[in-house]
Each structure stands twice: as structure tokens, then as C-alpha cells.
């Protein structure tokens, strides 16, 4: 067994802070519902639902200049913007000495990007002359990045069972909500498409964090040939 004074004995911080474990399980369950239910309801559609028209009408009343701001926000979901966003969030995690969370940022954002792309032809919902629209990959990616930032802040601030979820929720609502607003403002997606993107991130990021934490634990306690733990 490694001595307590050895730096190698210091375990890496978990990607998912223990205080947020119940919240992340709840997030994954809600995310699955937000992703799957609209997919089933709107599969094969090529037009807005009643709720889409209602939300679109509300967003269309945004202040002057909203279109330009929405375009700037939308850039974060484009390939170059998304790559820079991943690099920025990963760098923040590494500077804060949270390598497991940095891995969650890379794998999680990549996973939501792949999942949202794969689901589009499966759900086959279309907008603007046949473009596949469900779920919104832009919303999924930015929500995932915001969720990682929320986990980082909660961990750095040693947030508890109440403040931790509040911090994570605030970052998710701010980041994901901003991109959702941009997609609706630009009519790039129906409002229910961005709901699916939001759910995609809420589902994938907690699962990614849990998988990475489990991998770290397995590597940490890997037995040696004589049955002991590695020195």
C-alpha cells in the first residue's frame, strides 16, 4: 500500500462530486425523458407542433439586435467554435487539477455530438425544405459544456447537497438556454428540437462522468499478481 505522504497516494478528484451524485442520476433520468419522448411524438414530422408555434412567437418578440447576437452564439455550435469550446472547458479543468472532469468534457461533448447526429435520420424530423432537425446538436454541445463547468464550479467551491445542484443547474440553464434561444431565434430548429438537445446533454454528461470515475477507480485499485495493491 502506498504511504499517505506519497504524492501518488493522492487520488484524483472525481469527475462527479459526491454531493452531486443524486442530482446527476436524476439529471440522466430527466434527460432520457426529454430526449426520447419528443423523438417518439415528432418522428417523421415536417412542421412545427402547436407548442413550437407558441414558443416561436414568444421568441420572435426579442429585442432589436437579437438576430446578430443569436448568430454569434450559434457559432459555438459550429465545428470550429465547438472545438474551441471543448479546448477552453478542458483547459479550465486541467488548470484546476481536475483531469477526470477534463476527460468528461472531451468525451461528453464528443458523445452528445455523435448521438445527436446519429438520432437525426432515425427520428427523421425535418425543417426548411427537408433538413433533419431533431435533436439540436448545437444545444446539446453547449449544454454539455455548461454542465461540465457547473460540476467544476461546484467542486471548487466545495458545494454541498443543496448549493451544488443549484450551481450546476444555473450553469446548465444559462449556457444551454442561451444556445436554445439562439436556435429558435434563427429558426434553425423547432423549440422541441432544442428540448431534445437539452435532454441529450443531461443524459450523456452524467453517464460519461460516472464511466470515467469508475475507470479511475478500477485503475487505482487494480490488484497486483500477489493480490496486493500497486505501490
Image (cartoon, rainbow, N blue to C red):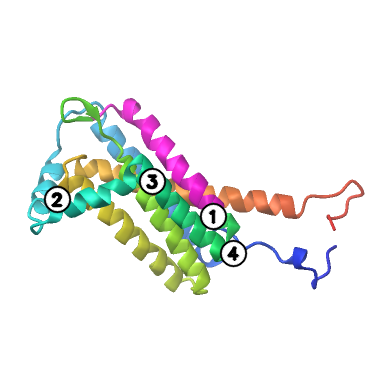
Cα distance in 3D space between marks 3 and 1: 15 Å
Residue drawn at the location 50% of the way across and 55% of the way down:
90
The reply to whether callout 4 and callout 2 are in contact (CB within 8 Å) is: no
Residue stretch in magenta: 103-125
Q: Is residue 26 visible?
A: no
Label 2 secondary element? helix
Discs 2, 1 touching: Cβ within 8 Å:
no
Q: Residue beneath label 3, please? A: 82
Picture quadrant where residue 217 is located:
bottom right
> Which badge, 4 or 2, is on the more N-terminal residue?
2
Query: CB under 8 Å between callouts 3 and 2?
Result: no
| Residue 67 x, y percent position in the rendering | 14, 50
Residue 67 numbered tag: 2
Q: Is residue 185 left or right of residue 168?
A: left
Distance, label 1 to label 4, CA atoms, is 9 Å
Determine which residue is flagged by label 1: 102
Q: Earlier in the sequence, mark 2 or mark 1?
A: 2
Vertical order, 118 against 38 (above or below) = above
Q: Is residue 44 magenta?
A: no
Task: Using the numbered discs, state the Cα–Cα distance from disc 3 to disc 2 in whole angstroms.
Answer: 20 Å
Other residues around mark 2 within 10 Å, as few (<14) / some (14–19) / many (≥20): some
In primary-sequence order, the first of circles 3 and 2 is: 2
Whichever of callouts 3 and 1 sits on the residue coming sooner in the sequence is: 3
User: Any mark on residue 33, and which?
Assistant: none
Estimate the spatial distance between the alpha carbons at disc 2 and disc 1, rounded to whole Å.
33 Å
Kind of element beneath mark 4: loop
User: Residue at (33%, 40%) from the top-left corner?
Assistant: 137
Q: Position of residue 38 (x, y in %)?
A: 28, 39
Residue at the outermost right position: 226
Circle 3: element type: helix
Which residue carries the number 4 mark? 97
Residue 63: x, y in percent?
9, 59
Amino acid at each position: 500500500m502506498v504511504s499517505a505522504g506519497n504524492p501518488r497516494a493522492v487520488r484524483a478528484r472525481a469527475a462527479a462530486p459526491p454531493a452531486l451524485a443524486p442530482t446527476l442520476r436524476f439529471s440522466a433520468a430527466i434527460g432520457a425523458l426529454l430526449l426520447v419522448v419528443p423523438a417518439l411524438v415528432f418522428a417523421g414530422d415536417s412542421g412545427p407542433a402547436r407548442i413550437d408555434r407558441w414558443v416561436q412567437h414568444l421568441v420572435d418578440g426579442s429585442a432589436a439586435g437579437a438576430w446578430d447576437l443569436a448568430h454569434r452564439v450559434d457559432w459555438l455550435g459550429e465545428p470550429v467554435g465547438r472545438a474551441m469550446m471543448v479546448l477552453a472547458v478542458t483547459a479550465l479543468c486541467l488548470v484546476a487539477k481536475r483531469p477526470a472532469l477534463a476527460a468528461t468534457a472531451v468525451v461528453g461533448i464528443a458523445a452528445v455530438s455523435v448521438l445527436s447526429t446519429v438520432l437525426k435520420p432515425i427520428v427523421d424530423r425535418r425543417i426548411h425544405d427537408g433538413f433533419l432537425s431533431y435533436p439540436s446538436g448545437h444545444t446539446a454541445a453547449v449544454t454539455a459544456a455548461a454542465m461540465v463547468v457547473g460540476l467544476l464550479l461546484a467542486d471548487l467551491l466545495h458545494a454541498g447537497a443543496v448549493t451544488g445542484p443549484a450551481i450546476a443547474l444555473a450553469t446548465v440553464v444559462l449556457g444551454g438556454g442561451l444556445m436554445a434561444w439562439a436556435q429558435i431565434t434563427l429558426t434553425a430548429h423547432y423549440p422541441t428540437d432544442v428540448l431534445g438537445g437539452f435532454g441529450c446533454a443531461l443524459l450523456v454528461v452524467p453517464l460519461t462522468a460516472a464511466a470515467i470515475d469508475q475507470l479511475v477507480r478500477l485503475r487505482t485499485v487494480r490488484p497486483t499478481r500477489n493480490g496486493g495493491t500497486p505501490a
